[in-house]
Image: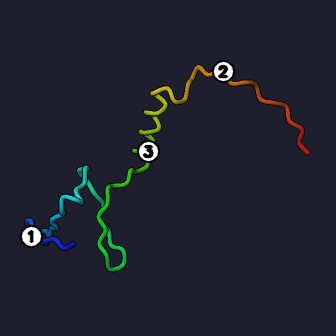
């Protein structure tokens, strides 16, 4: 599929066809060999920790859960 390249201020821009529209406000762009790749921004470590905090606050890790006592084990 071909698309248009144009100037936007001091930058060069590419018009993305509707089929390739992003539903995010930021994307990553990088070179891979002779290709230029545009993809959704990957979450960083602090975003991952924030997601884990949300899981905990939603009751995924139940604080009131009753765990059984550790079992005695015979080690070699």
Numbered label tally: 3
Give the residue drawn at x 43%, y 33%.
54
Q: Is residue 49 above or below residue 61?
A: below
Give the residue drawn at x 46%, y 33%.
55
Label ID, residue 22: none
Q: Secondary structure at mark 3?
A: helix
Give the residue drawn at x 55%, y 25%.
62
Q: Earlier in the sequence, mark 2 or mark 3?
A: 3
Q: Earlier in the sequence, mark 1 or mark 3?
A: 1
Q: Position of residue 29 (x, y in %)?
A: 29, 65
Specify the color scheme: rainbow
Label ID, residue 7: 1
Q: Is residue 67 above or below residue 3?
A: above
Label ID, residue 48: 3
Q: What's the CA distance linking mark 1 and mark 3?
A: 36 Å
Q: Position of residue 28 (x, y in %)?
A: 30, 60
Q: Earlier in the sequence, mark 1 or mark 2?
A: 1
Q: Position of residue 59 (x, y in %)?
A: 49, 26
Q: What's the CA distance linking mark 2 and mark 3?
A: 28 Å
Report the residue marked by disc 2.
66
Give the residue drawn at x 25%, y 54%.
22
Q: Look at the numbered discs 2 and 3 and tell me whether their residues touch, using CB distance below 8 Å.
A: no
Q: Secondary structure at mark 1?
A: strand
| Furthest-right residue in this view | 76
Q: Is residue 75 above or below residue 15?
A: above
- Assign the C terminus to one quadrant of the image: top right
Q: Position of residue 43 (x, y in %)?
A: 38, 50
Q: What's the CA distance linking mark 1 and mark 2?
A: 63 Å
């Amino acid at each position: 599929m071909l698309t248009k390249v144009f100037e936007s201020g001091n930058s060069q821009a590419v018009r993305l066809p509707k089929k390739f529209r992003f539903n995010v406000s930021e994307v990553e762009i990088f070179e891979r060999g002779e290709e230029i790749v545009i993809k959704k921004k990957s979450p960083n470590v602090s975003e991952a920790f924030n997601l884990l905090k949300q899981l905990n606050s939603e009751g995924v890790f139940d604080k009131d859960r009753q765990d059984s006592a550790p079992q005695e084990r015979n080690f070699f």
